[in-house]
Image: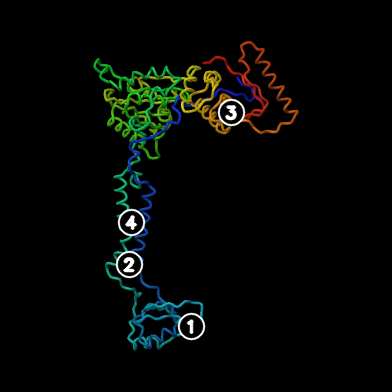
């Protein structure tokens, strides 16, 4: 029992994982680790195709040059010189083509406008009538057209400008799609691979092998799973008498009690492939993806049988049906229906066993829990004093301990802590020892780390003398009551140093575990 200032009490917390081996590398193999073309690389190829299309059209088939604007007087001068081939007139604008290119403004002439050379030109007719213009054009053999003058490029160039870019883009996308479809990634893989299972496969021959020796503090749960291991090792031992191993085992326990580690230990003891994923990974934006991933997952497991499928946090998709969508079936329900179908569809003789973990068994659908699917329910409890000491021994295998470190005393000081909390305790103690430049982790490091975890870190809060005196009286009252009240937990530590959200803390350590 812990009683801080201003009614800020330290309570038992929810905890995570139990007895996982320290510094355990996690490596995955399987469909996701195969050679794939990353989406970023696919978009790079797509951008290169666009750039190639732009350069091809711009440099190999340049469009018509822009016409040069000339004054009306220069236009008539070129007509008299016989340098105008054809014109087209609309209102007061005249467009035409010279016989020889003309530069305007002429080079060497002042002005800010740059000179340009072109065979095409435009000019503006003056507002007054020039009756001699038509006669001048006819006398100099200028073709007068009723339609705009266009630079001819031939049929192939016209077709290329019309359909070339689109065909190039379509061809490039088809190439990317087929390549990505073969490799399972990229632009096409994002669509064709969306229904594939995202389960991570742990192969005992390639990855670090986890066995029951790496699991501590949950012996009751281990004993429940020994038969599963025996079946995976020697299935004929049970099938010869007509028996069958459970198709599914549901691991129930508080967060951090070691459900995932226990499932991996079962696979490690049996020496079979282990497919692991979270239930939330089944559900995707697209309708039907979850059911497709379930089918693909069970297909992979059958191909690698005997094998174990582990679904963590199954309550995210295994909730009671009929509550999500009125008058229809949600994506979560479709995924659950497919899991039910798959677990009914394979025989226990195939050697595929489904392990699932949850900390909310009361919300699961009854059809999921019936015999023939999840036949067994294994409860993974928080470790007792003996279990906590065993877990501390597992986590301190790679930690140099100083003389005088008493793991039994630490186990007695940590009631209600799970394996994840104990692993965090060992890590915090190692960090404190390194910060203090020690060669070994001492008992004081563990006690200081425990205070930091249970009571909170110290706060450099400036408290006035009067306030500090009130805090001392307050915590002293808690300590006195803890000493004189019969049956109260012994007072372990009293402090008026601000910690966490409390200005002072009285820590009472239970002598025995409570359930």
Labelled pair 3, 1 in contact (Cβ < 8 Å): no
Give whichever of discs 2 and 3 has the lower sequence position.
Answer: 2
**Spot occupied by residue 402 in the image (x, y as percentages of width and height):** 54, 25
What is the C-alpha distance between the residues marked 2 and 3?
73 Å
Residue 60: mark: 2
> Can residue 6 be seen in the rendering of this structure?
no
Give whichever of discs 2 and 1 has the lower sequence position.
Answer: 2
Q: Are there few (<14), some (14-19), or many (20+) residues within 10 Å of tag 4? A: some
Q: Looking at the image, which is closer to me, 504 or 47?
A: 504
Residue topped by disc 1: 109
Q: Are there few (<14), some (14-19), or many (20+) residues within 10 Å of tag 2? A: few
Residue topped by disc 4: 169
Foreground disc of the pair 2, 3: 3
Foreground disc of the pair 3, 1: 3
Quarter holding residue 263 = top left
What is the C-alpha distance between the residues marked 4 and 1?
47 Å
* Image side of residue 51 versus residue 10, left or right: left
**Spot occupied by residue 343 in the image (x, y as percentages of width and height):** 32, 26
Give whichever of discs 3 and 1 has the lower sequence position.
Answer: 1
Foreground disc of the pair 4, 3: 3
* SS category of the residue bearing label 4: helix
Labelled pair 2, 1 in contact (Cβ < 8 Å): no
Residue 452: mark: 3
Q: Looking at the image, which is closer to me, 481 or 188?
A: 481
Quarter holding residue 60 = bottom left
State whether residue 292 is above or below residue 320: below
Labelled pair 4, 1 in contact (Cβ < 8 Å): no
**Spot occupied by residue 488 in the image (x, y as percentages of width and height):** 62, 14
């Amino acid at each position: 029992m812990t009683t801080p200032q201003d009614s800020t009490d330290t309570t038992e917390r929810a905890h995570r994982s139990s007895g996982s081996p320290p510094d355990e590398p996690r490596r995955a193999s399987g469909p996701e680790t195969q050679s794939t073309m990353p989406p970023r690389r696919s978009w790079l190829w797509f951008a290169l195709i666009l750039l190639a299309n732009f350069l091809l059209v711009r440099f190999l088939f340049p469009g018509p040059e822009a016409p040069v604007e000339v004054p009306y007087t220069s236009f008539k001068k070129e007509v008299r010189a016989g340098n105008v081939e054809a014109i087209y007139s609309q209102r007061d604008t005249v467009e035409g083509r010279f016989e020889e290119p003309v530069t305007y403004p002429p080079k060497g002439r002042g002005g800010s406008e740059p000179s340009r050379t072109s065979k095409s030109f435009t000019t503006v007719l003056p507002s007054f009538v020039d009756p001699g213009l038509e006669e001048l054009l006819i006398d100099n053999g200028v073709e007068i057209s009723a339609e705009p003058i266009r630079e001819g490029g031939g049929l192939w160039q016209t077709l290329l400008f019309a359909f070339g870019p689109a065909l190039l883009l379509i061809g490039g996308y088809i190439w990317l799609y087929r390549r990505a479809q073969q490799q399972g990634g990229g632009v096409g893989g994002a669509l064709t691979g969306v229904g594939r299972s995202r389960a991570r496969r742990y192969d005992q021959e390639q990855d670090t092998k986890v066995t029951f020796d790496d699991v501590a503090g949950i012996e009751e749960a281990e004993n429940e799973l020994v038969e599963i291991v025996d079946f995976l090792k020697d299935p004929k031992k049970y099938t010869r008498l007509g028996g069958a191993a459970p198709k599914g085992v549901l691991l129930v326990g508080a967060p951090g009690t070691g459900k995932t580690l226990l499932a991996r230990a079962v696979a490690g003891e049996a020496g079979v492939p282990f497919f692991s994923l979270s239930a939330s990974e089944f559900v995707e934006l697209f309708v039907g993806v979850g059911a497709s991933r379930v089918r693909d997952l069970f297909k992979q497991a059958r191909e690698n049988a005997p094998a174990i499928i582990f679904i963590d946090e199954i309550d995210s998709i295994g909730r009671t049906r009929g509550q999500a969508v009125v008058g229809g079936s949600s994506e979560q329900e479709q995924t659950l229906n497919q899991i039910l179908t798959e677990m009914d569809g394979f025989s226990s003789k195939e050697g595929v066993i489904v392990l699932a973990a949850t900390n909310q068994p009361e919300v699961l659908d009854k059809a999921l829990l019936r015999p023939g699917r999840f036949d067994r329910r294994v409860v993974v409890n928080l470790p007792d004093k003996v279990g906590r000491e065993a877990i501390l021994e597992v986590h301190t295998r790679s930690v140099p301990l100083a003389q005088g470190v008493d793991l039994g005393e630490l186990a007695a000081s940590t009631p209600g802590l799970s394996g994840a909390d104990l692993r965090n305790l060992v890590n915090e103690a190692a960090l404190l020892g390194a910060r203090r430049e020690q060669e070994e982790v001492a008992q004081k490091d563990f006690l200081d780390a425990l205070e930091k975890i249970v009571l909170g870190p110290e706060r450099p809060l400036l408290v006035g003398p009067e306030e500090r005196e009130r805090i001392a009286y307050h915590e002293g009252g808690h300590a006195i009551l803890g000493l004189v009240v019969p049956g109260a937990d012994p007072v372990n530590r009293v402090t008026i140093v601000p910690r966490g959200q409390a200005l002072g803390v009285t820590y009472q350590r239970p002598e025995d575990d409570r359930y």
